[in-house]
Amino acid sequence: MKTHEDLLFAEVAVLLDLISRDQGDKKLKQDGLDSVESFAQQAVDAGWINESERADIEKLVAARISKHDHNPEAGSRSGVCAT
């Protein structure tokens, strides 16, 4: 399973309509624990988002994690990219 930060990144990207739910699900399930790259980097490499969009999403993810006492699991909608 991916890190919670990767799942949250994918969730935010889907909510912003930058990637599809299917793209996120397939990439997260396909790579499993074998991937050393973050989902964010994989999304850029795949051409789904650009570096500017990545930075914007990462800011939102950081704000969400900070809001929940630095617990990336808290407050997640968890309906996106569930394995």
Image (cartoon, grey):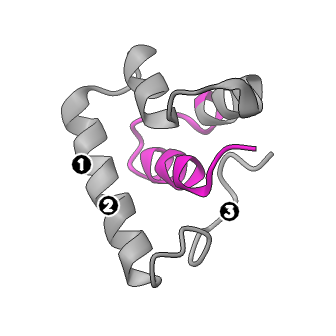
Q: CA distance from mark 2 to mark 3?
A: 16 Å
* SS type, badge 3: loop
Give residue 44's quadrant in the image.
top left
Mark sitting on residue 56: 1
Q: Are marks 2 and 3 in contact (CB under 8 Å)?
A: no
Disc 3 residue type (three-letter)? Ser
Q: CA distance from mark 1 to mark 2?
A: 6 Å
Taking the image as drawn, is residue 73 in sight? yes
Give residue 54's quadrant in the image.
top left
Based on the picture, tell me whether residue 18 belongs to the magenta stretch. yes
Instruction: Measuring from the top left, give residue 9's x and y in whole percent.
Output: 47, 49
**Residue at the far right in the pictured view:** 83
Q: Nearer the viewer, residue 33 or 7?
A: 33
Instruction: Measuring from the top left, give residue 25's x and y in whole percent.
Output: 69, 35
Q: Which residue is mark 2?
A: 60
**Residue at the far left in the pictured view:** 52
Circle 3 residues within 10 Å: few <14, some 14–19, many ≥20? some
**In the drawing, does residue 20 fall left or right of residue 13?**
right
Q: Which residue is mark 3?
A: 78
Q: Are marks 1 and 2 in contact (CB under 8 Å)?
A: yes
Based on the picture, tell me whether residue 6 belongs to the magenta stretch. yes
Instruction: Measuring from the top left, give residue 68's x and y in whole percent.
Output: 47, 82
Vertical arrangement, residue 33 with respect to residue 82, above or below: above
Point out the stretch of residues depicted in magenta.
Answer: 1-23
Circle 2 residues within 10 Å: few <14, some 14–19, many ≥20? some
Give residue 50's quadrant in the image.
top left
